[in-house]
Image (cartoon, grey):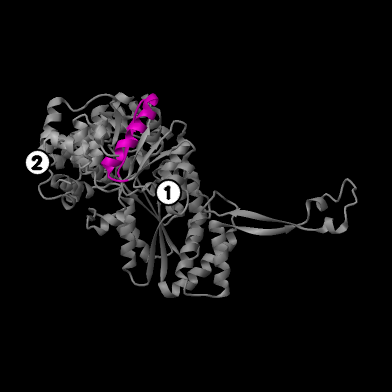
Amino acid sequence: MLRSLSSTSTDTLLQKIGAQPDGNIWTVLVVETSDIDEVISELSETISIFAECKIKIISAQSGASELIEQIVQSSENYLLLWTFEAWNCEDWHHLDACRSSLSKPRGGMLVLSSTSAEMMLNCAPNFCSWVGSRIYALAKDSELLTDPEREIRLSALREWSGFSDTDVIASAESHQLPLTPEYGEWLILLGRGDLIER
Amino acid sequence: MSNRLKFYREQMAAFEGTVDPQKSIDSGYYVPEPRKSSSSQIARIALRPSAKHLLIGGIGAGKTTQLLIACDQLNDIENISAHYIDVSLHTDISKISINTLMVITGLLLLELAKEYSDEKIKEYQDLIQKEAYGYSEYIKEKSFIEQLRDPLGLGLPHEFLNRPTQRWVGHQGILTKEKSNSIQDELKQAIRHLNDVVRSSYGEIIILFDGLDRLDDASRFNDLIKNDVQNISLAGIGVVLIGPLLTLYSQYRDIIEPAVNHTAYQSCFDVENDPESHSFFKNILNVRSQKDFIDQSALLSLIKYSGGVLRDLINLTQASIEEAYISDEENLKQAHVESATDSFGRAKLLGVSDQDLKVLKQVANTGKFVPRTDEEVRLLVTGRILEYQYPVKRFAVHPTLQPLL
């Protein structure tokens, strides 16, 4: 089932989030069940840089009512929701009926297994109407950008800033790099995501 | 932030499918619908203010926008006071029970009656607020031991046996917990009295209830129509409400439709066969985007692949702009739309069973569809199959899904 979805790499996903304006934009990321923990851990470290706001990770393990309550109470602008594997159709209906509670200044992301994603699509049509085309399968460990594509993007970033790759790495190492999505993307394209300031 | 990113974010912000429709109207993005819009049909309620109107339509068809426009139109009429209420912000719709709309109506009337204060209003205020949010009370009751009448014959002292115990008892409110044993007669009296009081200042009250289209239970919706909508209307208040699409295909249709004075259907716009609908969608894109930012071929693709569903048009455009940004392009081209529509169609395909697939192929090939089973109705509710009413009634598979079948 994962193969039927459009796939995306983490790099492209973060690039897309970095391009988005303020607004209640929701994305669904579908991953292998065994990878969910690792994906959440990775996204929890990087997503706030690209969303340019504080994020909150909320587990859906305790059911729809508890999740909705936590969403309503949260003050963070971007939410990362996970652990939907025990949910049944009724839980999704419940979340769907309370869709208005999911309004956040910057939106959020649901990380789901393919089984949960299928259930969501059939049982939460109102929420899915918000998500639209932003349902992606994560192509784990794959680099969706080819080398030439990566070089084109890097050239565009060099031209925009007037800096070289070396300048950017040096600035990042001395903690002088501006905290904007373009520089975060630049470091990731150079394979130096470790230099992104958390 | 680069100027390019700033520009793209501005373009994307104009196409936010999740934005409060009131904000879109306030931003000047509202484009009047072609022909007779649902809002103009709803506004007919002005002729008979205590009437009951029902608006039904698919998800993302623009029902809330029509409700808001109708509310504005009604408020422009002298001696009418129309109020828009999103029910889902007051209670959990998935557990909604009868009397909920009556209680919400009561709360609105109390707000309008703030300037009046007499004993009757205070009494009704207490009743409605307790019914809405619940309350606790301190109850004195006979001691448990006394109730047993000292069955063991321990010879407990008289004063001990007669000492009352005291405890707090909590009562849930209808807006905070599913409940069906409400005090309906008192509520009816309260609403009637409060409406009589506020009518002198505000004129005829009309309430537009939004959000009930997310109710996934035709039976509950039927209960609300028979009980709440009926009683609110009998109190002299006009009611307009949005209902779930599935009621049209349920056994309750024959009960619900005669129970209201008018039913409007907000269907998808047939952008393939109706030139006016096509122009309407084109105008929406032009009003929201910077001149020449969207290539002509991209614009036509966006209209085609929206399937005539307003939110799909808005969402697809935003996702296409995102694709254009990632591709380092300076404007929106057809290739970006194709990328977004492919994602959109693939997402719709997820969760489709073999039987669903059979039905989708049949609709794609013949255009024939008679939704009878729950699974077939679900294909409509989830927007995999779209229904058009004009120029001719027809069904079609969502155009983003069709190439993938």
Subunit under mark 1: A
Q: Secondary structure at mark 2?
A: loop
Q: Secondary structure at mark 1?
A: helix
Q: Is residue A110 visible?
A: yes
- Amino acid identity at mark 1: Val
For the C terminus of chain B, which image quadrant?
top left
Residue in view at x 27 percent, y 39 percent: A197
Q: Please state the horizontal and vertical placement of residue B256, each as a whole percent of the image.
A: 46, 50
Subunit under mark 2: A
Q: Residue furthest front?
A: A174
Q: Please state the horizontal and vertical placement of residue A169, each as a whole percent of the image.
A: 18, 35
In the rendered image of this protein, does residue B99 appear above or below residue A67?
Answer: below
Residue marked by disc 1: A72
Question: Which numbered circle lies on residue A162?
Answer: 2
Give the quadrant of residue B305. Answer: top left
- Amino acid identity at mark 2: Gly
Mark 2: few/some/many CA within 10 Å (<14, 14-19, 20+): few
Please identify the dominant SS of the magenta region: helix
Q: Is residue B216 visible?
A: no
Q: Nearer the viewer, residue B307 or B64?
A: B64
Give the quadrant of residue B373. Answer: top left
Q: Is residue A143 left or right of residue B184?
A: left
Q: Is residue B112 left or right of residue B182?
A: left
Mark 1: few/some/many CA within 10 Å (<14, 14-19, 20+): some
Measure the alpha-carbon separation of dots 2 and 1: 43 Å
- Pick whichever of labels 2 and 1 is earlier in the sequence: 1
Q: Which residues are magenta?
A: A25-53
Q: Nearer the viewer, residue B217 or A14?
A: A14
